Image (cartoon, rainbow, N blue to C red):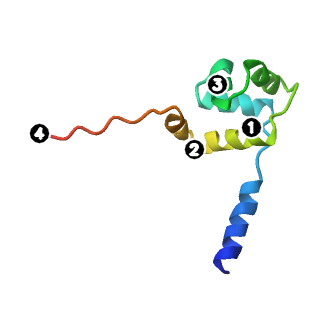
């Protein structure tokens, strides 16, 4: 298998994204310890949009689902997005 085939397989695998039904959205919010307002800020949508997702009145679009997938698999990325940096380890004098 050559590198091009491997890259295509990776892209094809990444193309699959969960649907994020209401229970999944709520589960992600719980995992991230966020309420609707905080999650809306993170997702760059209105709190009413998040409410629609959590009640099942609307489903997240593809881009929102991809973001949720990223936050679910790599929650530490949120710290990078908001500019949080882990304190440097103190060195002995």
| Mark 2 vs 3, N-terminal side | 3
Q: Looking at the picture, how far across and down is residue 6, in whole percent?
A: 67, 72
Between marks 2 and 3 in the image, the one whose residue lies nearer the viewer = 3
* Residue visible at 72% across and 44% down in the picture: 66
Using the rendered view, name the quadrant where residue 15 is placed.
bottom right
**Helix, strand or loop under label 2:** loop
Determine the CA span between mark 2 and mark 1: 15 Å
Tag 3 secondary structure: helix
Q: Are marks 2 and 3 in contact (CB under 8 Å)?
A: no
Q: Tag 1 or tag 3, which sits nearer the N-term?
A: 3
Label 2 sits on residue: 74
Mark 3 and mark 4: Cα distance apart in space: 42 Å
- Residue at numbered disc 3: 41
Quadrant location, the C terminus: top left
Name which of mark 3 and mark 4 comes first in the sequence.
3
Disc 2 from disc 4: Cα separation: 35 Å
Q: Left of 71 or right of it: where is 85?
A: left
- Mark 4 lies on residue: 93
Label 4 vs 1, first from the N-terminus: 1
Quarter-of-image position of residue 1: bottom right
């Amino acid at each position: 298998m050559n590198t091009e085939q491997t890259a295509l397989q990776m892209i094809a695998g990444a193309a699959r994204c969960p649907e994020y039904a209401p229970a999944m959205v709520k589960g992600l919010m719980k995992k991230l310890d966020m309420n609707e307002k905080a999650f809306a800020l993170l997702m760059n949508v209105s709190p009413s949009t998040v409410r629609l997702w959590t009640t099942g009145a609307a489903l997240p679009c593809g881009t929102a689902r991809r973001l949720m997938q990223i936050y679910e698999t790599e929650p530490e990325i949120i710290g990078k997005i908001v500019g949080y940096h882990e304190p440097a380890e103190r060195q002995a004098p």
